[in-house]
Image (tube, rainbow, N blue to C red):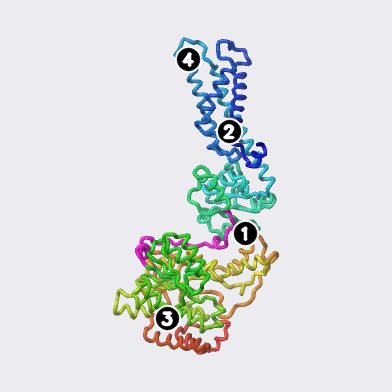
Amino acid sequence: MFSHWINIGYLPRWGVLLLDLLIVLIAFVVSYLIGSGLLTYDLTMRLPLWGQTLAVVGLQVLSFWAFHTYSGILRYSTFVDTLKVACSVGVTGIVLLIVNLTIKYGTDISNPPFLTSILVIYIFVAITLLFGWRVTIKTVFEHISHTSRGVEKVLIYGTKSAGLSIAKMLQSNMDSKYRPVGFIADQNDDAHHSLLTLKVYKLNQEVIDMMKKNRIKYVIVSPIKMKEINPMKDLKIFIDNKIQILTTPHFTDFDIINNQSLDDTERVVGRIESIRVEDLLERPVIDIDTDNVVTILKDQTVMVTGAAGSIGSEIVRQVAAFKPQTIVLFEMAESPLHDLTVDLRKEFPNQQFVPVIADVRNVDMVEEVFEEYHPHVVFHAAAYKHVPLMEDFPAQAILANVQGSKNVADMAIKYKAKRFVMVSTDKAVNPTNVMGASKRIAEIYVQSLFLQKAKDNADCTKFITTRFGNVLGSNGSVVPYFKKQIAEGGPVTVTHPDIIRYFMTIPEASCLVLEAATLGNGGEIFCFDMGQPVKIADLAKNMIRLAGFEPGKDIEITYTGLRPGEKLYEELLNQKETTIPTKNKKILVAKVREYDYKEVASQIESLIKLAQDGKVFPTVKLMKQIVPEFKSKNSVYEELDA
């Protein structure tokens, strides 16, 4: 039986109750000796000691049962458990005091069964002993846990409710690998000397020196704190000093210790993980007008091309939240489509998903899907996007990005879709590469198509375009590439020390698509206010530091030179273009040059024919005629610009 107790790791309830009663017995005897003045009172007229003890212990058992003081695990004792113990002892003492007073003043008996002084002393002694042994058990278990497992000391960044709740969770969870030893306060926090018995430090070099001296290698930042600060600026001091930044999952009720179960606490604590580089970027938050999105999507048939891609799959998930009737997953990659479908049906069991293996370059396949499902809203995310590859295979860029977009757009008109939203790129502005130019040509086609059709039918399909910067974490993007290089020990390769890019996250990109679908009346190109561009070299350095290494010492950064078609910076608007605001201050509408549809359609037909025939240089030459601002850089096609 003893072995069994050791294995289960905690005392059974009856064991806790017996120990509590033993302490109650000791407390009353001690109180009796103190209260009676070490037997100087005449006690012959009162209950004998054994009788008083039985009465106290018996009543205390009932009180313990009423407050369930024995039901918790002692090493996880909290303030609430202590309050229960105090209440149970207090109730016992008060009941006995009432009995005493009732007998003394309500009967002819002059000597009640208890001395009042003994009962008052008992309340304080019992609470002290019961509280003391719980604290002792908790402290011993914490010490054993921290010394037997390699527990890491951490500081909590922030002294408000979120930071306090994280500290409480870590203190109450003995299985956590992190132990809070203090708080760090910034200018937004209230001034404190200590919180939860932990010291509060100011964010400066002194606290960094203290952390190094005491080998504290981690700081935990709550998701709420991340929204209050400029991560790139305020957390830089930790990154520069090789202090790893951790964060917790988003959870709405930070008073988790008092309002949620121990399992919930362990679940949240168990998901403390290293901060992502995406979290360091100061990003404007996009607020979607959900009422408008519901109006457009609810109970409708929605089709997403490139559905298994990084952007496409996130669009699908966000669309599913608005409960359309059917979501058609249009994708040519079999395995990613299968995996996505399995995940979606598990995540949204009540939503109807229709996976379709098809290629946007095949107009017959596209029409077959439109004819069968008649989608009301089309999100067109299928495209080739890698600049160096498309520079080597311009014909494929035209067939996928131009012909594919044309096929889907034409079928949207033919089968009377209500809205068509196309995903474009900032590389379409003043393009210096084939990929960007192909996306600009696709923009030109869908815009001119809408303007042509709107002349005769104001209720025709609304064609809307959205331009994105680089998407963090998407397939083939720089962040997963850098992570892989860091995991391999380096070097991390950057094309140029001065190259900069605009960045956004996958959810942000998908939010912009949905918002564009609600704001657009047709023919617009929406641009996202992406804040300040990020230097790729700085991004690489920060990722190396976040991984716990020092750039240039532990992991080298090498510069490989600009790739074909690559430029140092991207633009969101052509120099001749202007923007106008929308009701969403984070989204602007680009006023771009309008093209004649018949002329554009004729040129694109010729362009597609050249691409199908595999005539590379004639294909690129015609692209430059359609998009005069297309000037190649670091590319074999520069001779065409002469």
Indicate left or right for 34 with 554 as reference: left
Q: Which residue is mark 1?
A: 239
Labelled disc at residue 103: 4
Residue 286: in magenta span = yes
- Tag nearer the camera, 1 or 3: 3
**Along the viewing direction, whichever of 481 and 350 lies nearer the viewer:** 350
Give the quarter of the image for residue 451.
Answer: bottom left
Labelled disc at residue 14: 2
Question: Separation of disc 1 and disc 4 at Cα?
Answer: 72 Å
Local crowd size for mark 2, using a 10 Å CA cut-off: few (<14), some (14–19), many (≥20): few
Query: Residue 513 location in percent, x, y?
Result: 43, 68
User: Up-down: is 181 above or below 351?
Assistant: above
Q: Which residues are magenta?
A: 271-300
Q: Considering only order in the chain, which callout, 3 or 1, is on the residue closer to the N terminus?
A: 1
- Tag nearer the camera, 3 or 4: 3
Labelled disc at residue 457: none
Local crowd size for mark 1, using a 10 Å CA cut-off: few (<14), some (14–19), many (≥20): many
Q: Considering only order in the chain, which callout, 2 or 3, is on the residue closer to the N terminus?
A: 2
Question: Separation of disc 2 and disc 1 at Cα?
Answer: 51 Å
| Residue type at tag 3 | Val
Q: Residue at x 65, y 60 (%)?
A: 548
Residue furthest front as drawn: 1
Residue 336: in magenta span = no
Which of the image's four quarters has the N terminus? top right
- Is the Cβ of the residue at disc 1 closer than 8 Å to that at disc 3? no
Q: Is residue 579 shown to the viewer in this render?
A: no
Give the quarter of the image for residue 380.
Answer: bottom left
Indicate left or right for 323 with 428 as reference: left
Question: Separation of disc 3 and disc 2 at Cα?
Answer: 75 Å
Labelled disc at residue 363: 3
- Tag nearer the camera, 2 or 4: 2
- Tag nearer the camera, 3 or 2: 2
